[in-house]
């Protein structure tokens, strides 16, 4: 069962890296293409964490976030081994693992994370993000849902 979750994480990595490669090959840094009235494709470089947190830390953040991603990935694999039969929990962890490793590949290869999905409306742009970020966010939401479901299940059976 562990192989299934690791394969799912690998699929996330492949989708993330393939989409980033496509953007890198067709855009120059800062270039944007309006796709709809609320969505652009844009090539952005994020040297920080989510929402460019610590992006101006002078380069140390590259290694800090890389170490955090490696430690988190090892911990997630350990959790997947221990809880591999818990489907929703493991599905969520596999998404987070794939996203963390997808962004880690960027940090090691480029020194920044490639972002390209830009949603906007009413003059406001949400921070650009990528497939790895979306997988991490979905995984985190599923972990919250799993926690709520587990609590609900415990109260109905207890």
Image (spheres, rainbow, N blue to C red):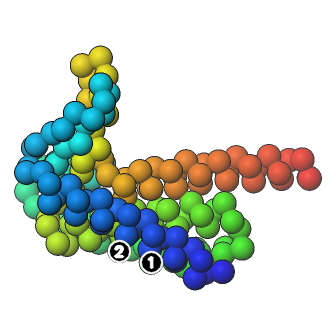
Foreground pick, 72 / 136:
136
Q: Is residue 109 left or right of residue 29?
A: right
- Residue 100 vertical position relative to residue 116 in the rendered view, above or below: below
Q: Position of residue 113 (x, y in %)?
A: 22, 58
Figure check: 6 above or below 24: below
Say which of 84 and 30 sits in front: 30
> Does dot 2 land on a helix, a strand or a loop?
helix
Q: Give the residue drawn at x 45%, y 50%.
A: 137
Identify which residue is drawn at 19% across, 43% down. 42
How far from the left and from the top, in percent, is residue 21? Answer: 22, 63
Q: Compared to 20, does 73 lie above or below?
A: below
Res 135 → quadrant: bottom left
Q: Which numbered tag is attached to residue 93?
A: none
Classify mark 1: helix, strand or loop.
helix
The label shown at residue 70 is: 2
Considering only vertical position in the picture, is 37 above or below 90?
above
- How many other residues sit within 10 Å of disc 2, few (<14), some (14-19) or many (≥20)? some
The reply to whether the C-beta atoms of the residues labelled 1 and 2 are less than 8 Å apart is yes
């Amino acid at each position: 069962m562990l192989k299934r979750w690791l394969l799912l994480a690998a699929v996330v990595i492949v989708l993330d890296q393939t989409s980033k490669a496509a953007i890198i090959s067709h855009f120059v840094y800062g270039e944007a293409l309006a796709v709809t009235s609320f969505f652009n494709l844009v090539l952005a470089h994020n040297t920080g964490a989510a929402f460019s947190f610590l992006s101006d830390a002078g380069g140390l953040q590259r290694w800090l976030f890389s170490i955090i991603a490696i430690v988190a990935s090892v911990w997630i694999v350990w959790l997947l081994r221990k809880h591999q039969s818990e489907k929703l929990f493991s599905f969520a962890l596999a998404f987070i693992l794939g996203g963390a490793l997808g962004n880690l590949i960027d940090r090691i290869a480029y020194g920044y994370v490639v972002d390209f999905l830009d949603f906007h409306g009413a003059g406001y742009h949400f921070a650009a993000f990528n497939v790895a970020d979306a997988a991490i966010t979905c995984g985190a939401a599923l972990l919250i849902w799993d926690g709520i479901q587990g609590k609900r299940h415990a109260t109905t059976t207890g």
